[in-house]
Image: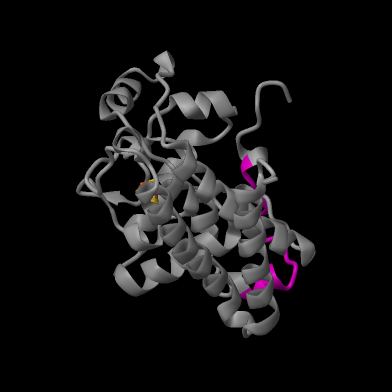
Amino acid sequence: MTHPHSASDFLIRAQQEATSEILREFAPEEVATEVAENALEFSDRMILRVLSQSSRAEQPACSVHCTSCCHLHTTASVPEVILLAERLRLGIEPLAPLQAKLASHIAQTEGLRARERRHLRLPCPLLADGMCVVYDARPLVCRGWNSLEIKRCEADLAHPVSETEAYLNMNQYRAASQIAQGVANAIFNLGLDARPLDMVRGLAIALEVKDAALRWLAGDDLFLAAVNEHVFPPFSN
Ligand code: SF4
C-alpha cells in the first residue's frame, strides 16, 4: 500500500540528501550558491512534472509579466538570498539604487505584525519595469506560488483587506515547499539556523556583507535580524 505522504516525503528526502551532499563536498565559498542553484533546478523539474500531470483546469494562469503576487511578502533561505546577491552583483551596476530600494522597503515594513504585512501590498524591490530582475534565481516561494484565476489576484491586490484567496495548483505549491523543507532539514542538521528569512532583509544583508556566505557557514548569526518570524511576528505572540 502506498503511504498517502510518500510523494511529498520523496521530495523532502531527495532534496535533503542532495543538499547534505553539497554541504559536505563543496568548497566553503561555493556551498551556499550551489545549495540554492541545486534546489531551484530541482524545483523547476518537479514543477514541470507536476504541471504535465495536472488537468487543463489546474494549469496556472501566471505569466512572467504578471506581478500581482510580487506585491505579497516573500521569504527565502540563506542560500537563496546569497545566490540572489551574487546574481545581482554580476548583473546590476551600480548596486546602490537597488540597495536604497531595499532600505526603503525595510523602513516601510518595520514593526509590522504578520497580518499587517500581508495587507501592505508593497511591490518587491526586485521588480523593475513590471518584471523580476532576478527571475531565473527567484526563490522557491516565488516558484511555488501560482494562480488559476488572475482576477482573484487582481482583486486581492486592489483590496488587500478583502483577503481574496488565490485558487492554486496545490501540487505546484507543495512541490516547492517540500523542496524548501529538504534544504532546511539539511542546513539544520549541520547546526546552522535554517529558519526562513524575510527575503528583503536577508538580501540587504547578503549584499552588504561580502563574505556573508562564509560567515553563515561558520555559524555566525549574521542573518538573525532577517529571520522572518522575528521580523513579522503573528498577533498571538
Ligand atoms: S523575487 Fe522576483 S518573482 Fe519573487 S516576489 Fe520579487 S520580483 Fe516577484
Q: Nearer the viewer, residue 122 or 72?
A: 72
Side (left or right) of 215 relative to 29:
right
Position above or below: 20 against 53: below
How many marks the image carries: the answer is: 0
Q: Nearer the viewer, residue 145 or 33?
A: 145
Answer with the quarter of the image where residue 145 lies. Answer: top left
Q: Is-magenta flag for residue 9? A: no
Instruction: Evaluate whether residue 208 shows in this view.
Output: no
Side (left or right) of 174 relative to 49:
right
Q: Position of residue 139 (x, y in %)?
A: 46, 54
Residue drawn where x is 47% and y is 58% of the image: 43
Q: Position of residue 67 (x, y in %)?
A: 29, 40
- What is the quadrant of the N terminus in the image? top right
Residue drawn where x is 31% and y is 35% of the image: 68
Q: Position of residue 7 (x, y in %)?
A: 60, 50
Answer with the quarter of the image where residue 26 lies. Answer: bottom right
Position above or below: 142 against 107: below
Q: Nearer the viewer, residue 157 or 171?
A: 171
- What is the quadrant of the C terminus in the image? top right
Look at the image and give the residue range highlighted in magenta: 214-228
Position above or below: 129 against 207: above
Q: Is-magenta flag for residue 217? A: yes
Instruction: Evaluate whether residue 94 shows in this view.
Output: yes
